[in-house]
Image (cartoon, rainbow, N blue to C red):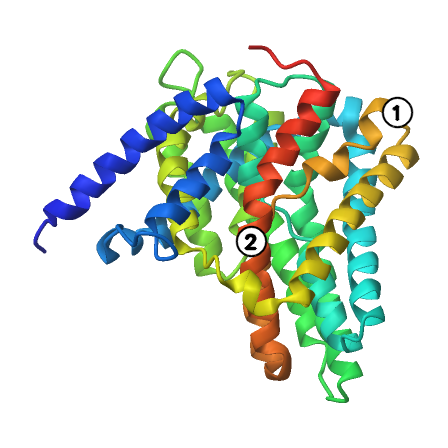
Amino acid sequence: MEVNGVSLIVLGLLFLTGLAVDALGHRTKLPRVTLLLLCGLFVGGAGLDLIPRSVQDLYPMVSVVALGMVAFLLGGELSLNTLREHGRGILVISLSVVIVTMVVVSAGLWAIGISASAALLIGALATATDPAAIYDVVREKKAKGGFSRTLKGIVAIDDAWGVMLFALVLVVAQRLNGTLPDDQHLLSGVFEVLGSILLGTVIGIPAAFLTGRLSDGEPLRIEALGLVCLTTGLALWLELSYLIAGMTAGAVIANLARHHTKAFREIEHLEWPFMIIFFILAGASLDSGALLAVGPLGLAYVLLRILSRVLGGWIGGAAARSPEKERRWYGVALLPQAGVAIGMALIAADLFPEHGSNIMALAVSATVVFEIIGPLSAAWAITRVEKPKT
């Protein structure tokens, strides 16, 4: 296969753009995730259309590897020490945010005239969160307090709740539509979650004892990359969730490894170049005109999701007895939404073709909005609760 010089030039420019965006973010205090997405939107199909197809075709592979790395890093946050200190908050707040989001968005859309089945499906989409954006904002802010640790724990498990809830909603929506489904969709959702946890455990246990034996106790970079690719590849091959599998493997390694203390240091070193390409190409793939196509429904969804996240975070924080200064900010920090919601929308559109166009347009438009304002709100919340190191 002939090497495409233009593709290499564009990739080089994208890496240098990421470096410039990183510097700009430090000067303006804007999250680099938002800046990268806006940059991608500007040079992508919705803007100047400067990125060649050969580079855009890299997006699926880059996104899987980048999110696989994020999954391992988030799993590493679920150490026993963190769970002992913040476990109640992580569990209660994550469940509260998912349930309240589902109820408020579904009820609100149904109240303005959306059919019950469509409202339930869209409410389930609203529960999805973008862990990559939130994790990067926390790391960029150098936040080390209890709020940021709880936040990372929440995004590490809330997609598992969302997947199970979405599977249940598919069955309920089909019954409301008068079809006669079996329980295959619900069982497949449960299988996906449990199978992903099992896969992560099977990989994590030997990795915890075998990695880091060649380099003074710390894992090598090649070991880190190998684990990420092996876990995500097996999960995709088995049609499981590579995010849940990666988080499980990361949690197992962080808790079982005794001969090293920084199991994922090398992943942190590898992650940022992938994240630069991931977020720029994600921005380039967004359709800025999608929000206009959905109209009032899109505006209602955005407002209802913001309200539900804030309310769910406050209720969960109160139930978990989190410090009062943190309760109002959990939902604000959990606004980013991306790939998982698009995946849910594709499944819903396939099973409910009568709602398919609206659901897909809404999912794409919500991605445009929440991937731009979400990192900003997360950075604002962290700054208000903690005093990050500069």
Q: Residue at 66%, 39% (x, y): give it.
A: 155
Front residue (pair 61, 315):
315
Return the residue found at the far left. 2
Front residue (pair 249, 267):
267
Q: Is residue 105 above or below residue 26?
A: below
Q: Quadrant of the N terminus?
A: bottom left
Q: Amino acid at mark 2?
A: Thr
- Label 1: which residue? 324
Front residue (pair 91, 98):
98
Residue 41 - label = none
Front residue (pair 139, 291):
291
Q: Residue at 43%, 59% (x, y): give it.
A: 237
Q: Residue at 61%, 79% (x, y): give it.
A: 351
Residue 336 percent location from the top left of the image = 61, 44
Q: Residues within 10 Å of mark 2 (few under 14, many from 20)?
A: many
**Left or right side of 6 for 257:** right
Residue 367 - label = 2
Q: Is residue 168 above or below residue 48?
A: below
**Tally of numbered discs:** 2
Q: Quadrant of the C terminus?
A: top right
Q: Which element is circle 1 on?
A: helix
**Left or right side of 59 for 180:** right
Q: Is residue 186 above or below residue 237?
A: below
Q: Amino acid at mark 1?
A: Glu
In which image quadrant can residue 205 be found?
top right
**Left or right side of 63 for 180:** right
On the question of residue 190 being in view, the answer is no
Residue 372 percent location from the top left of the image = 55, 43
**Left or right side of 243 for 185:** right
Residue 233 percent location from the top left of the image = 41, 51
In which image quadrant can residue 373 be found?
top right
